Image (tube, grey):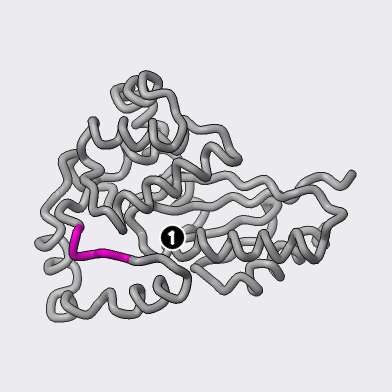
Amino acid sequence: MNSALTIDIISDVVCPWCYIGKRRIEGALALYAQQHPDRSPPVVRWHPFQLNPDLAPEGVSRSDYVQAKFGARAATVYDRVKAVGASLDIPFAFDKIARQPNTRAAHSLIALAEPGPQQEAVVQTLFDAYFIEGQDLTQVSVLVALAQRAGLDPAQAQAALADERVIDQISEADQQARAMGVQGVPFFIFNGRVGVSGAHESEDLLRAMENAETEA
């Protein structure tokens, strides 16, 4: 049996293009399974990146954040993201988001999950909670409930959220990604060899997967 291709995804849960990237890598994985039925399913692992690592744990007002970041473009800056999301059946609801969070706590839940279906469920749940439901990811009670929804043990989730060592590990992983040269997310690393920055189309991600398998 061939050794499984590894896919490491560096992303942030408040990055809309990362949600789009998740949907597109799922499409690439489906194409891979169709075209290479003899190969082992790839192993997908999610890693943290913070778009706003300096935000306070309680976050800031989303409207103030968007206005400060985009100024005159604030009213229209997400139009393209919404259109791309709609094409992928992602009903982005930016108007529901009241709080821009520091995402270290949310990332600690992803780190708690086992790579594979469990971690995928946590990532998906966090994306849906933030971008579709407008939930406040600064609240521990919200995060614990989301962890339970995704299949994690709520007591373990609560412990991880309170563990400063876990939070520090998230910050260190974020810094390591930047040291590797990651400046934006999503960022995909295939077999530790081929890096792809951005939420490219599924067909492009499939080619990167295949290239990684053929490179020595």
User: Which secondary structure dominates the residues rendered in magenta?
Assistant: helix
Q: Residue 11 in the image: x percent, y percent?
A: 44, 53
Residue at position x 32%, y 65% in the image: 92
Check residue 95 for magenta coloring.
Answer: yes
Q: Name the element at disc 1.
A: helix
Q: Say which of 198 and 114 sits in front.
A: 114
Above or below, comparing residue 40 to residue 165 in the picture? below
Seen in the image, is 23 located left or right of residue 76?
right
Q: Percent x, y for residue 198? A: 49, 68
- Is residue 13 depicted above or below 36 in this figure? above
Q: Residue drawn at (45%, 65%), measured in percent from left and top? A: 20
Residue 76: x and y in percent read: 22, 80
Residue 196 to residue 51: above or below: below
Q: Which residue is mark 1?
A: 18
Looking at the image, residue 152 lies above or below residue 42: above
Query: Is residue 65 found left or right of 8 in the rendered image?
Result: left
Quadrant of residue 207 within the rendered picture: bottom right
Please report the bounds of the magenta region as a residue range. Answer: 92-96
